[in-house]
């Protein structure tokens, strides 16, 4: 703690015990386990926001692998094992929408009558593409 950085730069800390990398503007930024790097502020904000390793959609809480200086988790390693999935199932096992009446959603092909491509010369079109002036 107590680090000072030049204006326009931020310290970014990798909370994981493994290598972590993110890309910004074609440049790959690699972090060794529990490493702190000084990066331009724009880069630091971009890559930390996109370093989510766990997300709970019901509480809207997320855990980030990378954190910037000033964050309460700065220089505090993430010790929990990483999950196979990004979404946390701690609060609920099945993700259903409130308007489904509690039923699980599932993909289904719905036929649309009259669907398909109609060319410009198709008489079933309601409006002509080109109007000829006389």
Image: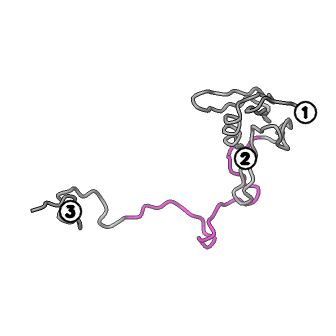
Q: Name the residue under label 2.
A: 54
Q: Which residues are drawn in magenta?
A: 82-111
Residue at 47 percent across and 61 percent down: it is: 108
Q: Which of marks 3 and 1 is nearer the N terminus?
A: 1
Q: Which of marks 1 and 2 is nearer the N terminus?
A: 1
Q: Earlier in the sequence, mark 2 or mark 3?
A: 2
**Label 1: how many residues lie within 10 Å, few (<14), some (14-19) or many (20+)?**
few
Residue at 87 percent across and 31 percent down: it is: 3
Q: How many marks?
A: 3
Q: Is 98 contained in the magenta span?
A: yes
Q: Name the residue under label 1.
A: 2
Of badges 1 and 2, the one in the foreground is: 1
Is 58 on the left-hand or right-hand side of 112?
A: right
Q: Nearer the viewer, residue 114 or 127?
A: 127
- Disc 1/disc 2 C-alpha distance (Å): 29 Å
Q: Which of 74 and 116 is in front in this view?
A: 74
**Label 3: how many residues lie within 10 Å, few (<14), some (14-19) or many (20+)?**
few
| Residue 113, image x, y percentages | 32, 67
């Amino acid at each position: 703690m107590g680090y000072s950085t030049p204006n326009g730069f931020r310290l970014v800390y990798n909370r994981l015990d493994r290598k972590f990398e993110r890309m910004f503007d074609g440049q790959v930024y690699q972090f060794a386990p529990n490493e702190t790097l000084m990066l331009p502020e724009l880069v630091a904000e971009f890559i930390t926001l996109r370093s989510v390793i766990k997300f709970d959609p019901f509480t809207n809480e997320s855990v980030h692998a990378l954190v910037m200086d000033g964050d309460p988790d700065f220089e505090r390693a993430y010790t929990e094992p990483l999950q196979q999935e990004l979404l946390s199932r701690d609060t609920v096992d099945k993700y259903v929408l409130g308007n489904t009446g509690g039923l699980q959603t599932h993909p289904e092909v719905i036929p649309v009558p009259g669907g398909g491509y109609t060319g410009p010369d198709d008489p079933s079109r309601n409006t002509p593409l080109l109007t000829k002036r006389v």
